[in-house]
């Protein structure tokens, strides 16, 4: 569509404020142009070979400071579009340059009224139809509980940042977990290998112990001869009439030519400090009479004991006490 351009004239030597030259809509695209003739005190200004740009200001807000214009037959054509969403009264200042030097800036701005769409300020109801209403509803739904869509988008950006940090943390945790799992797997394998080795060692040791026990049992069995083993009990009697009243008993065990006797003297003569008892199950070798040993009696006195064949000689440094008794064990070699 081609529309007739809006004509305007500006006298750069005049102090009179320009009237509104025309009206356009904020949504106009490539159809609205302003043709400006520049004069100086009534004479048309020759601007051939010049470059012209325009400055757009709407209600004291700079919209664009370098709008490219065309120059044809000393008429400057200005495209009236791209107002950055603003509407109101557009003030236009022209900047005329020749050979890289600014030769003229129009001192009094041109005026154009820029209107908005009536839909921009219209209220939207649930029954409103059309693309604008749908867009507004989408924006309303999109912003949710936020005051505006910008805050909602900022919130989403923050959520995405938090999510990214969370994902990164989880990735790092997974990497750490994988590392720990690998370490645990290696440790488990090492433990299993060590256990297997220990089991083998224990099995070998157990077999060795079993073999040694078997060998020991065989050796003991070979050494043991039941015909040489004997055990029993007996009674001791005074060796002479002068020691009548002494009493004693014994339990013995014999293996080969070795006999062990547990002796219990239950009655001593309280007026004597020496007695002789006879009746041991086997006579000791003659060499035994050359040695003796000392035991404690029930009266807590040291008593000397000496063997002579199957006799026992019992002596004390003091006379025996009433109810004094003696218990001892002796092992000796029989004749």
Image (cartoon, rainbow, N blue to C red):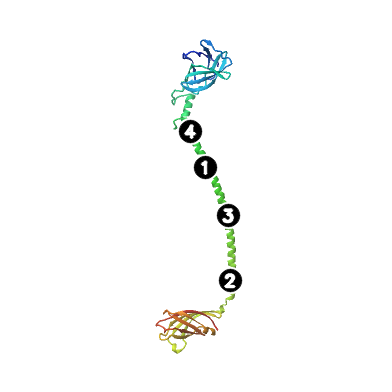
Q: Is residue 76 visible?
A: yes
The residue drawn where x is 53% and y is 10% is 43
Does dot 3 land on a helix, a strand or a loop?
Answer: helix
Tell me the residue that label 2 is attached to.
216
Q: CA distance from mark 1 to mark 3?
A: 31 Å
Q: CA distance from mark 2 to mark 1?
A: 68 Å
Tell me the residue that label 1 is attached to.
169
Of marks 2 and 1, the one in the foreground? 1
Local packing at callout 3 (Cα closer than 10 Å; few below 14, some 14-19, many 20+) is few
Q: x and y percent of residue 246 in the render?
A: 43, 85
Q: CA distance from mark 2 to mark 4?
A: 90 Å
Q: CA distance from mark 4 to mark 3?
A: 53 Å
Q: Is residue 88 left or right of residue 215?
A: left
Of marks 2 and 4, the one in the foreground? 4
**What number is the disc on residue 331?**
none
In this rendered view, identify the residue nearer to me: 321 or 73. Answer: 73
Q: x and y percent of residue 104 in the render?
A: 53, 17
């Amino acid at each position: 569509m081609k529309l007739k351009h809006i004509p305007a004239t500006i006298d750069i030597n005049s102090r009179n404020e320009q009237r509104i030259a025309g009206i356009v809509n904020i949504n106009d695209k490539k159809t609205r142009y302003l043709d400006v003739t520049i004069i100086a005190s009534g004479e048309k200004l020759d601007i051939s070979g010049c470059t012209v740009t325009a400055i757009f200001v709407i209600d004291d807000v700079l919209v664009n400071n370098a709008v490219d214009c065309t120059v044809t037959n000393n008429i400057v054509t200005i495209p009236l579009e791209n107002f950055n969403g603003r509407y109101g009264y557009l003030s236009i200042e022209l900047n005329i340059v020749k050979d890289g030097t600014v030769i003229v800036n129009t001192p009094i701005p041109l005026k154009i009224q820029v209107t908005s769409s009536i839909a921009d300020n219209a209220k939207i109801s649930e029954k409103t139809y059309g693309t604008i209403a749908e867009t507004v509803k989408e924006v309303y739904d999109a912003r949710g509980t936020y005051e505006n869509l910008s805050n909602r988008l900022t919130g989403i950006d923050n959520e995405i940042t938090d999510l990214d940090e969370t994902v990164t943390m989880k990735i790092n945790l997974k990497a750490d977990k994988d590392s720990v799992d690998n370490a645990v797997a290696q440790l488990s394998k090492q433990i299993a290998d060590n256990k297997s080795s220990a089991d083998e060692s224990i099995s070998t040791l157990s077999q060795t112990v079993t073999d040694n026990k078997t060998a020991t049992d065989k050796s003991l069995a070979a050494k043991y001869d039941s015909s040489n083993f004997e055990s029993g009990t007996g009674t001791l009697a005074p060796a002479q009439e002068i020691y009548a009243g002494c009493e004693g008993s014994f339990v013995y065990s014999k293996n080969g030519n070795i006999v062990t006797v547990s002796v219990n003297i239950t009655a001593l003569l309280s007026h004597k400090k020496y007695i002789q008892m006879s009746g041991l199950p086997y006579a000791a070798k003659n060499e035994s009479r050359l040695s003796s040993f000392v035991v404690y009696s029930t009266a807590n006195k040291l008593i000397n004991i000496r063997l002579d064949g199957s006799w026992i000689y019992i002596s004390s440094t003091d006379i025996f006490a009433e109810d004094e008794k003696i218990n001892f064990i002796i092992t000796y070699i029989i004749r």
